[in-house]
Image (tube, grey):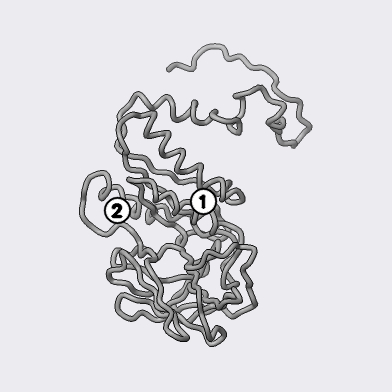
């Protein structure tokens, strides 16, 4: 396309010297003139592609939705279902990137807000058939919402895509919480996809443990075969465990495919009911502050 010839222009907005242009509030704009209006991004970016074939999709989004994580539990499965319906090519594979670590590094045993609840909403979308999850919660940067390590995100997505879209055999899920057993003062945890479970650095970290009072403390942990045993001297009668329950968690357990344990909780307590006393975090050897 040639750009030769006369160009035309028109003044869009008067600006004082050095001022930044401002978009008018969405409510005052004509419908369809802003990406914030419903369906604008879909019609501009997705609908034009529907006439083409599709082998699968990757979804890396959610930061702006973190405060609205309860809505996201319905929105993301709805998006997957609607795209599959529009393309009419069956339940093509759909990969989801679980939000990267962000904000200040974890100092409390668990957190109520931030990214962790949105990560859970993303994981719940795995109930939709043909989906897979590549977490980035261990490779982000606390002060950069667009972390640089996209290569590892791509590797994890590739493992899922090769398995779900092309039938390649291999481990493509991180260890996923399966069950727990209370054994007096300790809790024994079991996981699916946990072949070669190991900690990067010593000791294994990332666990918080609570009794019936719902007060979570950092837990000691050790790997025993295919189980992880957790305990705390501050919780003599434990009933619940959470793992990596923070926006920027300190956690270090992986399987043989070098995929991390996904954040999880064994309780069904409302976030407002959690008690978070001050406690001392343990940093494993070799840990690099994110």
Name the disc covering residue 201, or none.
Answer: none
In percent of width and height, residue 132 lies at 36, 50
Q: Is residue 247 left or right of residue 26?
A: left
Where does label 1 land, which residue?
Answer: 146
* Residue under the image location 46 percent in, 78 percent down: 284
Q: Nearer the viewer, mark 1 or mark 2?
A: 2
* Residue under the image location 44 percent in, 30 percent down: 46
Between discs 1 and 2, the one toward the N terminus: 1
Quadrant of the image occupied by residue 274 = bottom right
In percent of width and height, residue 239 lies at 50, 76
Instruction: Indicate the secondary structure of the residue bearing disc 1.
Output: loop
Classify 10 Å Cα crowding around label 1: few (below 14), some (14-19), many (20 and above).
Answer: few
* Residue under the image location 67 percent in, 17 percent down: 10
Q: Does 29 appear above or below 77?
A: above
Find the distance from the CA under tag 1 to the CA under tag 2. 22 Å
Q: Does 148 appear above or below 15?
A: below
Q: Quadrant of the N terminus?
A: top left
**Residue placed most toward the observer, 130 or 101:** 130
Classify 10 Å Cα crowding around label 2: few (below 14), some (14-19), many (20 and above).
Answer: some
Q: Please indicate, yes or no, whether residue 111 appears anywhere in the rendered image.
A: yes
Number of marks drawn: 2
- Name, please, the residue furthest toward the right: 16
In percent of width and height, residue 216 lies at 57, 75
**Residue placed most toward the observer, 183 or 231:** 183
Q: Is residue 166 left or right of residue 242?
A: left
Where does label 2 land, which residue?
Answer: 159
Q: Please indicate, yes or no, whether residue 201 appears anywhere in the rendered image.
A: no
Report if the CB atoms under discs 1 and 2 are less than 8 Å apart: no
Q: Does 220 appear above or below 121?
A: below
In percent of width and height, residue 109 lies at 57, 73
Instruction: Indicate the secondary structure of the residue bearing disc 2.
Output: helix
């Amino acid at each position: 396309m040639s750009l030769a010839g006369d160009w035309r222009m028109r003044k869009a907005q008067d600006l004082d010297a050095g001022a930044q242009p401002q978009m008018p509030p969405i409510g005052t704009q004509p419908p369809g003139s802003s990406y914030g209006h419903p369906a604008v991004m879909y019609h501009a970016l997705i609908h034009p592609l529907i006439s083409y074939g599709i082998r699968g999709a990757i979804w890396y989004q959610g930061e702006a939705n973190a405060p609205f994580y309860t809505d996201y539990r319905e929105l993301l499965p709805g998006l997957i279902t609607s795209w599959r319906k529009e393309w009419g090519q069956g339940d093509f594979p759909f990969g989801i990137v679980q939000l990267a670590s962000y904000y200040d590094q974890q100092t409390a045993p668990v957190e109520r807000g931030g990214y962790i609840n949105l990560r859970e909403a993303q994981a719940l979308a795995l109930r939709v058939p043909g989906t897979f999850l590549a977490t980035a919660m261990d490779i982000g940067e606390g002060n950069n919402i667009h972390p640089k390590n996209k290569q590892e995100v791509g590797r994890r997505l590739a493992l899922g895509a090769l398995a779900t879209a092309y039938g390649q055999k291999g481990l493509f899920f991180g260890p996923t919480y399966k069950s727990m057993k209370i054994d007096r003062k300790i809790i024994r945890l079991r996981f699916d996809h946990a072949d070669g479970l190991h900690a990067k650095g010593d000791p294994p970290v990332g666990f918080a443990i609570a009794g019936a009072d719902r007060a979570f403390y950092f837990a000691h942990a050790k790997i025993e075969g295919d189980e992880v045993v957790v305990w705390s001297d501050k919780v003599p009668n434990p009933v619940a465990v959470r793992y990596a329950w923070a926006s920027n968690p300190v956690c270090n357990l992986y399987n043989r495919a070098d995929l991390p344990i996904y954040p999880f909780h064994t309780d069904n307590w409302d976030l407002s009911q959690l008690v978070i006393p001050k406690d001392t975090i343990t940093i494993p050897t070799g840990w690099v502050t994110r």
